[in-house]
Amino acid sequence: MEMHVLAIASKEAFLPFREYRTWYRITGSLDSDRLPLVVAHGGPGCTHDYVDAFKGITEIDGRPVIHYDQLGNGNSTRMPEKGPEFWTLELFLEELDALLHHLGIQDRYAFLGQSWGGMLGAEHAVRRPKGLKALVIANSPANMRTWVAEANRLRAELPQEVQDMLLKHEQAGTINDPQYIAASRVFYDRHVCRVVPWPPEVARTFAIMDEDATVYRSMNGPTEFHVIGTMKDWTIEDRLHLIEAPTLLLSGKYDEATPLVVKPYVDRIRECEWVLFEHSSHMPHVEEKALCLATVSAFLSRHDLGA
């Protein structure tokens, strides 16, 4: 018997946003009766590449999945000349709203944000948009001060020679030195992505950031340990009770988003379930891909009907 595998449609285009362009891609068809899922990457300042795996949800349940590169990143308009005052939370919330309306899905959609993308998703959700029927927050802080404290706690568990190398270059102001980058990589391999070597799509995101880290530097800072950008005092803890959308929280056992980092979402969102991936750090969608995608698909499928 011959097997005919139907190719899943994929469409790339640009959203005109302000005087710029935001790249997006739709996997599957928006004509589906399933909730369309918008996926937002982290950073701030990463690209869609490392969260590309989520398009596999279309294969599982036929749901359209929309990826996009946030302004200043990846395939969208890059603006290395813009200062920190340009790169605001409001900018990215406005861009998300523009994308939802451009696609005509603003009345019925689901949203998945990974790391910074989950912070953006939470900020979107506390405004109680009528069309948001399900929210997935993956590996995201609810308070940047907790995030930094936990990053430095995990750093203190690294081998002493790695800690010494990090400190030496930080004090000398030479954090672009290959030795510092190699020492940082020890942290990343433990707490960001434990698949070694990194899968091509993960490596691609970091390579693109290496050539243009404008957004990351402006909003976060130079490293995961030194958050001195515009988001350094950000918290949403005191507003999480406003979220009405049913929420799924994802994190990894070895995640830089430790249980302490993600716990406010569980404690303060009225309808929130938490799945902890036992063999993952910050990227369960890469580290335990099949289980992660099945978990997200099952959650969203429970909210398709009547949504």
Image: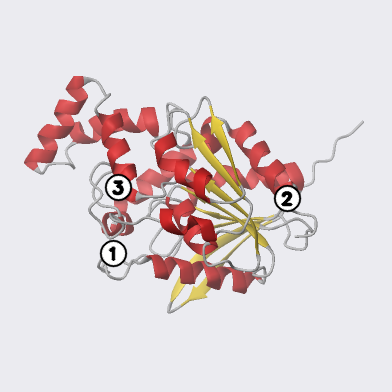
Residue in the foreground of this view, choosing between 65 and 276: 276
**Which residue occupies 24% across, 30% down?**
183
Element type at marker 1? loop
Badge 1 or badge 2: first in the primary sequence? 2
Label 1 Cα neighbours within 10 Å, binned few <14 / some 14-19 / many ≥20 = few
Q: Name the residue that disc number 1 marks.
A: 80
Return the x and y of residue 31 as percentages of the image width and height. Answer: 77, 63
Judged left or right of residue 58, residue 275 is left
Residue in the foreground of this view, choosing between 245 and 5: 245
Separation of marks 1 and 3 at Cα, in angstroms:
27 Å
Separation of marks 1 and 2 at Cα, in angstroms:
35 Å
**Which residue occupies 29% across, 53% down?**
220
Return the x and y of residue 103 as percentages of the image width and height. Answer: 64, 69
Residue in the foreground of this view, choosing between 228 and 86: 228
Residue in the foreground of this view, choosing between 135 and 201: 135
Return the x and y of residue 92 as percentages of the image width and height. Answer: 44, 66
Separation of marks 2 and 3 at Cα, in angstroms:
42 Å
Judged left or right of residue 109, residue 195 is left
Element type at marker 2? loop
Q: Is residue 7 visible?
A: no
Badge 2 or badge 3: first in the primary sequence? 2
**Of the residues shown, which amino acid type is indicated by label 3?**
Arg
Q: Is residue 242 above or below residue 152?
A: below
**Which residue occupies 10% across, 44% down?**
173
**Which residue occupies 37% across, 44% down?**
206
Image quadrant holding the C terminus, namely bottom right
Q: Name the residue that disc number 3 marks.
A: 145
**Residue, far left:** 172
Q: Name the residue that disc number 2 marks.
A: 8
